[in-house]
């Protein structure tokens, strides 16, 4: 059903925030697309008591299997293995095939995956890893978990991803790695980032958590750096409930990731070199057979799921640009032909409109439109970083015993990131199934209604009748 915006706007002229009727009263959410395929497969595995086929100790073929490409592991028997059961290996092989990477190593979360990937690069404790402050906390936490020191780089105000110019200025003798985040599924100016890293001989770990099956310059995100990591937790475009996957074309990195994922120290022998042993102290980051089976079935729906997001986002962006462009600007996407919005992101011009983003957010939410104001603070403003209190009373990994830098999280010049978080960012998390362009029309209608009432909102704000708090 198509909506006549002008007629509806006349009927609901007063903002719901000010006592009028909301544009939307029914529930508005994205959710996983689950059908009998997943349900039947999970039920079958449960009936067969196949919950996990991982073994955390060496078996006859373990050392040879560690080196095999993911597609070659499908020929192995379906019993217990150091590399997981049938559906773990099916999922890894299919993901490997879909994105064009030789090795795919599933894990129980993308956070585990990022931590594992950094450790597999054999970075020295106290090494600096540059990343963005405009991201979920897991990005920076994984760096700390790898005994490295996060250094926060400003973002490009249009892409919301790492600024190449800001990155170049941060690189020093302690820098060993860069972790770009493909925020909302956007690569940003990744080619420039990679050129800078290549010039300085830096490792690259792609945080591709929000960009499954997304292509940039004809190649899958996650496959540009030394290693990439994707997320499959419940809100993501493709989901397993909880889970993630690491990808690389480097056999040595893949082998170490497989060891770190599954109690790697258990299969090390006296004959192994020190280099092989470094960072193979293992965790239990294994994905269960049930989660892997869900993931395997979800991959069969990946094109449909991404297509829904692409269509909804294009519809929203087109209408925003045509009807709301004076105050609302879409995030600049550097690969629009292959963009499947995890979050549809925009910049609200608080200065030009005379009404702060937070009041606009209140008004939109009152109209029945869930709206995301962005992360409530930059990652660098978290007390763990400001006080350097991650591990122990001696403040590891910042302890002077093995960190020779002087990063100060209390005095970071991050003008673009701070302005975006404090004033501009507006996002919509509801691009996925079961939403359609009819649902997206309600977002447009609500924004038209809010903008129609801007003058009133300005007056009420100036009089102090409407107040807002940045909540930072």
Image (cartoon, helix red, strand yellow):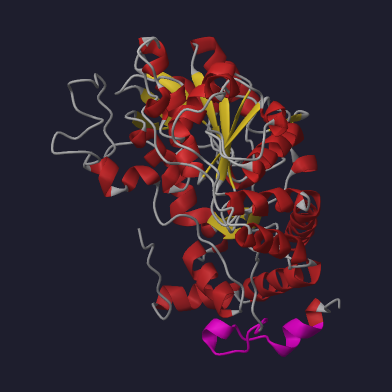
Would residue 399 be seen by someone viewing this image from the given angle?
Answer: yes
* Residue 80, x across and y down, in percent: 56, 39
Q: Quadrant of the N terminus?
A: bottom right
* Residue 426, x across and y down, in percent: 56, 58
Depth check: give the residue in front, 195 or 327.
195
* Residue 310, x across and y down, in percent: 77, 52
> With respect to residue 213, does 272 lie above or below?
above
Residues drawn in magenta: 7-25
- Quarter of the image for residue 29 reads bottom right
Query: Is 434 placed left or right of 455 in the picture?
Result: right
* Residue 352, x across and y down, in percent: 56, 57
> With respect to residue 37, does 26 lie above or below?
below
Give me the residue at 74% from left, 68% from top: 435
> With respect to residue 89, does 45 lie above or below?
below
Q: Quadrant of the C terminus?
A: bottom left
Magenta stretch: includes residue 421:
no
- Quarter of the image for residue 247 reads top right
Would residue 333 be seen by someone viewing this image from the given angle?
Answer: no
Magenta stretch: includes residue 22:
yes
Query: Is 198 placed left or right of 417 in the picture?
Result: right
Residue ranking furthest to the left? 393
Give me the residue at 75% from left, 28% from top: 217
Give me the residue at 49% from left, 12% from top: 200
Query: Is 157 placed left or right of 328 in the picture?
Result: left
């Amino acid at each position: 059903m198509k909506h006549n915006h002008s007629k509806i706007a006349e009927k609901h002229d007063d903002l719901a925030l000010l006592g009028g009727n909301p544009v939307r009263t029914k529930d508005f959410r994205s959710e996983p697309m689950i059908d009998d395929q997943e349900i039947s497969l999970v039920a079958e595995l449960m009936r067969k008591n196949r919950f996990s086929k991982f073994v955390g100790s060496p078996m006859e073929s373990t050392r040879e299997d560690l080196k095999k490409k993911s597609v070659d592991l499908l020929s192995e028997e379906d019993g217990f293995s150091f590399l997981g059961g049938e559906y773990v290996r099916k999922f890894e092989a299919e993901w490997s095939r879909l994105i064009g990477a030789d090795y795919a190593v599933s894990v129980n979360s993308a956070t585990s995956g990022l931590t594992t990937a950094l450790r597999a690069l054999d970075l020295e404790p106290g090494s600096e890893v540059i990343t963005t402050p405009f991201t979920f906390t897991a990005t920076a936490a994984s760096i700390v978990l790898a005994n490295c020191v996060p250094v926060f780089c400003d973002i490009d105000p249009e892409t919301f991803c790492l600024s190449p110019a800001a990155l170049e200025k941060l690189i020093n003798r302690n820098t060993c790695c860069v972790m770009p985040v493909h925020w909302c599924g956007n690569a940003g100016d990744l080619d420039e980032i990679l050129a800078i890293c290549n010039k300085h001989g830096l490792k690259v770990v792609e945080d591709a958590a929000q960009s499954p099956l997304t292509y940039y310059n004809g190649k899958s995100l996650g496959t540009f750096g030394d290693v990439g990591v994707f997320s499959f937790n419940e809100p993501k475009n493709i989901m397993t409930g909880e889970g993630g996957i690491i990808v690389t074309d480097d056999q040595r990195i893949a082998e170490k990731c497989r060891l770190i994922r599954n109690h790697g120290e258990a299969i090390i022998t006296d004959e192994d070199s020190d280099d092989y042993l470094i960072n193979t102290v293992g965790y239990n980051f294994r994905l269960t057979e049930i989660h892997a089976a869900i993931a395997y079935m979800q991959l069969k729906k990946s094109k449909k799921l991404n297509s829904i997001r692409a269509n909804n986002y294009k519809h929203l962006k087109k209408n925003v640009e045509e009807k709301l462009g004076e105050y609302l600007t879409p995030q600049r996407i550097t690969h629009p032909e292959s963009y499947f919005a995890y979050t549809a992101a925009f910049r609200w011009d608080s200065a030009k409109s005379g009404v702060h983003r937070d009041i606009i957010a209140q008004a939109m939410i009152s109209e029945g439109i869930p709206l995301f104001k962005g992360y409530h603070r930059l990652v660098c403003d978290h007390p763990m970083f400001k006080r350097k209190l991650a591990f122990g009373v001696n403040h590891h990994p910042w302890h002077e015993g093995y960190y020779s830098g002087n990063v100060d999280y209390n005095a970071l010049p991050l003008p673009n990131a701070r302005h975006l978080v404090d004033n501009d960012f507006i996002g919509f998390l509801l691009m996925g199934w079961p939403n359609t362009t009819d649902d997206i029309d309600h977002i447009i209608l609500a924004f038209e209604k809010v903008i129609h009432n801007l003058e009133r909102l300005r007056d009420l704000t100036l009089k102090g009748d409407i107040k807002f708090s940045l909540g930072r």
